[in-house]
Amino acid sequence: MSLFHNSVYLSLFLSIAAYETGCIIKKRCGIALCNPLLIAIVLVIICLKALDMDYADYEAGSRYLSYLLTPATICLAIPLYEKIMLLKNNLKAIIAGVLSGIVTNMLIVLLCSSLFKLNHQQYVTLLPKSITTAIGISVSQELGGIVTITAVVIILTGILGNMTAEWVCRLFGIDDPISQGVGFGTSSHVIGTARAMEMGEIQGSVSSLSLVLTGILSVLFVLIFSAVY
Amino acid sequence: MIPMKYVNQILIILGIALAGELLRAVIPLPIPGSIYGLAILFFLLFCNLLKPEQIQDAGKLLIDLMPLMFIPAGVGLMKDWQAFAPLLLPASVITVVSTLAVTAVSAGTTRFIRRRRERRTI
């Protein structure tokens, strides 16, 4: 049995099979709460418990997936470049929206952290919560946060935004597709963008531009905000 | 030539990743190497030093595979559960309040600026 546990392919197979299962479930039921990534994480944890496998054994194989994260994040420059060319005329309004969203997010995290008397590590763990997962978990790691918690909070933020952003836009009478796209991408990254794409092509493009901009520009604000608490 | 396509594209992407890590090591700021890499690639594309076609296939593949790369981090919660339990309430409050507020503020700001510009052009 230990020979089986030590195979790196077991972790990789489990992870990818769990994600595939998550995709099938998502397709069947169609609601945002059935996020494939969230389902995959829960399924893998259940399997590890059932196989009596340590996280360290799992990590020995699954780290090969994590190694791909840096090159994949770099490739976000491709959609960024394409969308900037496409949305040149509205770039100023989009960047202003993104910046206001970043500051709002970090002020709220700062305020709530002091309200709940969190320590610095807990604060920097939650600070990157609206940033796309790839950039968010690297930022959390750089700041000394607890990466695993950051990842889960980011995913939950995405799911919540996916389900509520349309309603928030309606509440505030925001009906132009560009502003809607900024709202989705800035608040709930890739998972929100999936919903924006269903609403329309413009919403989808603006949302995917906003999510990359949020990721990059947040890094600068994180430098300031991580120093104040 | 087609089989060479991925080799060449992966070489370019890994070269940029390496340059990003190098910058991270040299610059004393808590900025991940991937962000420097992203900036380098964007700069190369923006200045036409690199065409999107030259990295597109490998790039799209990596972006498509990205959700898989977050599974290990999420599963890690099983070892960090003790640290997560006391954060459950604060994290929930922060997530709900900030997600709703960020959507409203960012979308509202963009609409405000676009309307102001429209008015000026009329």
Image (spheres, coloured by chain):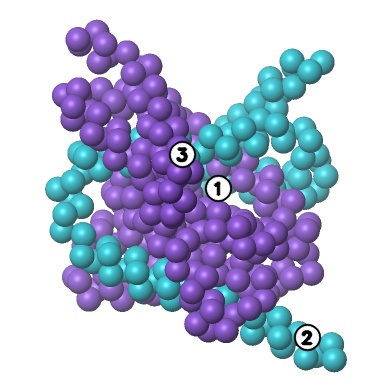
Chain colours: A purple, B cyan
> Residue at the spot x=54%, y=76% of the render?
A169
Binning the other alpha carbons within 10 Å of mark 2 as few (below 14), some (14 to 19) or many (20 upward) gives few
User: Residue at label 1?
Assistant: B35
Chain ID, mark 2:
B
Q: Residue at x 70, y 63 (%)?
A: A202
Secondary structure category for the residue under label 1: helix
State the image quarter where residue A109 is shown. bottom left
Marks 2/1: CA distance? 35 Å
Left or right: residue A158 versus residue A43 is right
Q: Position of residue B60 (x, y in %)?
A: 65, 37
Q: Position of residue B105 (x, y in %)?
A: 51, 78
Q: Position of residue A176 (x, y in %)?
A: 67, 76
Instruction: Give the residue type that dot 1 points to.
Output: Ile
Q: Which residue is mark 2?
A: B118
Q: Looking at the rendering, which quadrant does residue A160 occupy?
A: bottom left
Residue B23 shown left or right of residue A113 in the figure: right
Instruction: Please check whether the numbered discs 2 and 1 fall on a single chain.
Output: yes
> Residue at the location (25% across, 15% down)?
A5
Say whether residue B22 is visible. no
- Mark 3 lies on a secondary structure that is helix
- Residue type marked 3: Cys
Residue at 59% from the left image edge and 61% from the top image edge: A196
Which of pointers 3 and 2 indicates the residue nearer the eye? 3
Q: Position of residue A37 (x, y in %)?
A: 41, 43
User: Is circle 3 on the same chain as circle 1?
Assistant: no
Badge 2 element: helix
- The residue at which mark 3 appears reads as A23
Q: Please tell me in which quadrant of the rendered image residue B56 appears.
A: top right
